[in-house]
Image (cartoon, rainbow, N blue to C red):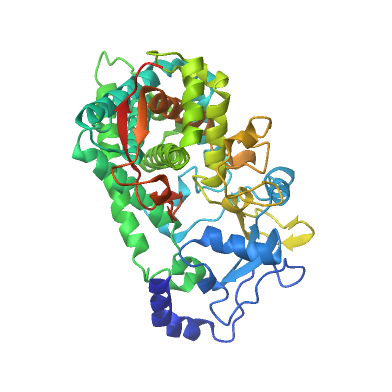
């Protein structure tokens, strides 16, 4: 936060000139407001956030409770940090708190007005979610896509097999990202986006990571909106450049397909791009902006969250060799030697499912759910006025010591005799959210994460690079819209002897 402090000091004079004698806005009202830290003049509790806001807010919640009011600059947010209160926000009062708090970083190219992630509930938001569900995420298209996912995983294993023969380490996050990216690309465009062996793969991953990080890092403009025209940290300018790079890629696909569709005898590919081009709103075709924003939602959110989960899972397994051995033993028993893991095997892999649940409990892809009150509401008896910012701290809920025994430990066994799942009904485990804003890609992520992780474990033995021990593995996080490993995991694959 040092850079934020310097920037804030530089622009403090501007803020004082515009807001002297003016009270800061309070998202929780001045009356029956939740408890929280006493705000410092002007800055509030801004400097308490640090570089890991999910951890800082969890520490504050331990002192002030599962519903607290935190003023950050001019803006006061209600922070929710327990399963019981999250259920109240995301289920009992789902309609009231179904809005989205929009960060300044994504206010480029009108993205916030066309993206399913950032749009407020409305006709276009409902239409695009329904379209994505019908074409990609419901049971029928998912079942139809099993062959595609099998091919992409075979390509993943072939790449890892080459590295095993050469005795080289593998960047787990990168290979998982490319596999997920090309799966989405084939679903949307009927072709791969990148080659897993090419430098372009890393460049695309870096671009997606930059967008995710830019949308999540603390931005002084979000706390002092008066500074929005200045963009003092340059975050919006950088995001615009990154967005334009992706738009250029998508526009080539869109315009090329439009040309093909206008050609006599065009044969439909039946992919998601065809479905987008078939859509009309108010009698008009979807604009390129609307299509680009939807594609960004799919590629940015879809590719990084699944690959991050696989990377975190492999990191935890390498730190806990006995748990990796147990997962591999189950795979040997259920799948058998020399056989490829199939999606139909997943329900029988109870221990592997427990490993994934424990991974997303400790390392949720999205540490925060940024909601907004659509009307005046109430949380645990506290008044929450319309347009209030409501932050659900998913990371804190997953480590609540009143719910979880040894909350910081990696213990998949806790889920073996538990019915707790992450599909939005058990609020102690909500890495994909819950209610009407639950991540629509959950069904695909569930299948793909299990398939990739099981295939990597069943086909190869894994060890850390020479001279490195499990306790040496760096598990620090890099905060953003998603929670990535600060240091990418590199592991060495070894061809397994037949069990």
Q: Does 158 sit left or right of 471 as displayed?
A: left
User: Which residue is at 26% across, 42% downward?
Assistant: 202
Residue 276 appears anywhere in the view: yes
Quadrant holding the N terminus: bottom left
Give 24 or 426, whichever is nearer the viewer.
Answer: 426
Give 209 or 265, whichever is nearer the viewer.
Answer: 209
**Would you place residue 25 above or below residue 283 in this image?**
below
User: Which residue is at 39% across, 56% downward?
Assistant: 214
User: Which residue is at 37% across, 32% downward?
Assistant: 180
Quadrant holding the C terminus: top left
User: Which residue is at 27% across, 32% downward?
Assistant: 193
Q: On the image, which quarter does residue 149 sit in? A: top left
Q: On the image, which quarter does residue 179 sit in? A: top left
In x, y percent, where is residue 158?
A: 27, 23
In x, y percent, where is residue 256?
A: 24, 30
- Give the residue at the far right of this rendering: 381
**Would you place residue 380 above or below residue 156 in this image?**
below
Give 298 or 286, whichever is nearer the viewer.
Answer: 298
In x, y percent, where is residue 431?
A: 56, 42
In x, y percent, where is residue 322?
A: 49, 34
Q: On the image, which quarter does residue 12 sit in? A: bottom left
Residue 423 appears anywhere in the view: no
Q: Does 8 sit left or right of 364 as displayed?
A: left
* Count of numbered labels shown in the rendering: 0
């Amino acid at each position: 936060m040092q850079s934020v402090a310097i920037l804030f000091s530089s622009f403090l004079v501007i803020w004082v000139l515009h807001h002297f004698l003016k009270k800061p806005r309070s998202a929780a009202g001045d009356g029956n407001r939740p408890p929280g830290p006493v705000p410092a003049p002007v800055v509030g509790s801004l400097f308490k956030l640090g570089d890991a806001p999910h951890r800082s807010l969890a520490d504050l919640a331990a002192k002030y409770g599962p519903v607290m009011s935190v003023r950050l600059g001019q803006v006061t947010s209600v922070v929710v940090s327990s399963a019981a209160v999250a259920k109240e926000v995301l289920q009992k009062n789902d309609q009231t708190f179904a809005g989205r708090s929009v960060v300044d970083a994504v206010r480029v190219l009108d993205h916030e007005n066309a993206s399913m992630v950032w749009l407020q509930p409305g006709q276009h938001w409902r239409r695009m979610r329904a379209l994505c569900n019908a074409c990609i995420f419901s049971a029928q298209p998912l079942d139809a896509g099993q062959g595609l996912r099998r091919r992409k995983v075979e390509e993943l294993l072939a790449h890892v097999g080459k590295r095993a023969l050469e005795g080289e380490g593998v960047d787990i996050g990168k290979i998982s990202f490319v596999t997920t990216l090309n799966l989405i690309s084939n679903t949307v465009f009927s072709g791969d986006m990148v080659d897993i062996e090419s430098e372009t793969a890393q460049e695309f991953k870096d671009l997606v990571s930059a967008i995710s990080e830019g949308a999540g890092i603390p931005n002084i403009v979000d706390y002092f909106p008066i500074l929005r025209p200045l963009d003092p940290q340059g975050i919006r300018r950088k995001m615009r450049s990154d967005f334009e790079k992706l738009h250029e890629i998508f526009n080539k696909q869109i315009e090329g397909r439009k040309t093909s569709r206008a050609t006599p005898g065009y044969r439909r590919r039946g992919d998601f791009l065809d479905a987008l081009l078939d859509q009309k709103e108010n009698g008009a075709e979807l604009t390129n902006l609307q299509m680009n924003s939807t594609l960004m939602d799919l590629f940015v959110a879809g590719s990084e969250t699944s690959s991050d989960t696989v990377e975190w899972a492999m990191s935890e397994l390498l730190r806990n060799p006995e748990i990796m051995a147990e997962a591999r033993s189950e795979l040997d028993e259920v799948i058998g030697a020399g056989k490829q893991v199939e999606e139909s095997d997943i329900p029988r892999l109870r221990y592997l499912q427990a490993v994934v649940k424990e991974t997303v409990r400790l390392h949720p892809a999205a540490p925060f759910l940024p909601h907004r009150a659509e009307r005046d509401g109430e949380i645990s008896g506290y008044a929450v006025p319309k347009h209030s910012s409501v932050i659900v701290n998913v990371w804190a809920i997953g480590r609540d010591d009143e719910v979880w025994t040894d909350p910081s430990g990696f213990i998949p066994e806790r889920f073996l005799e538990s019915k707790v799942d992450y599909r939005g009904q058990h609020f102690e485990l909500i890495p994909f959210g819950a209610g009407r804003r639950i991540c629509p890609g959950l069904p695909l992520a569930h299948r793909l994460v299990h398939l990739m992780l099981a295939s990597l474990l069943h086909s190869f033995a894994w060890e850390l690079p020479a001279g490195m021990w499990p306790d040496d593995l760096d598990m620090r996080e890099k905060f953003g819209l998603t929670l990535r490993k600060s240091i990418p995991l590199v592991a060495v694959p070894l061809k397994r002897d037949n069990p």
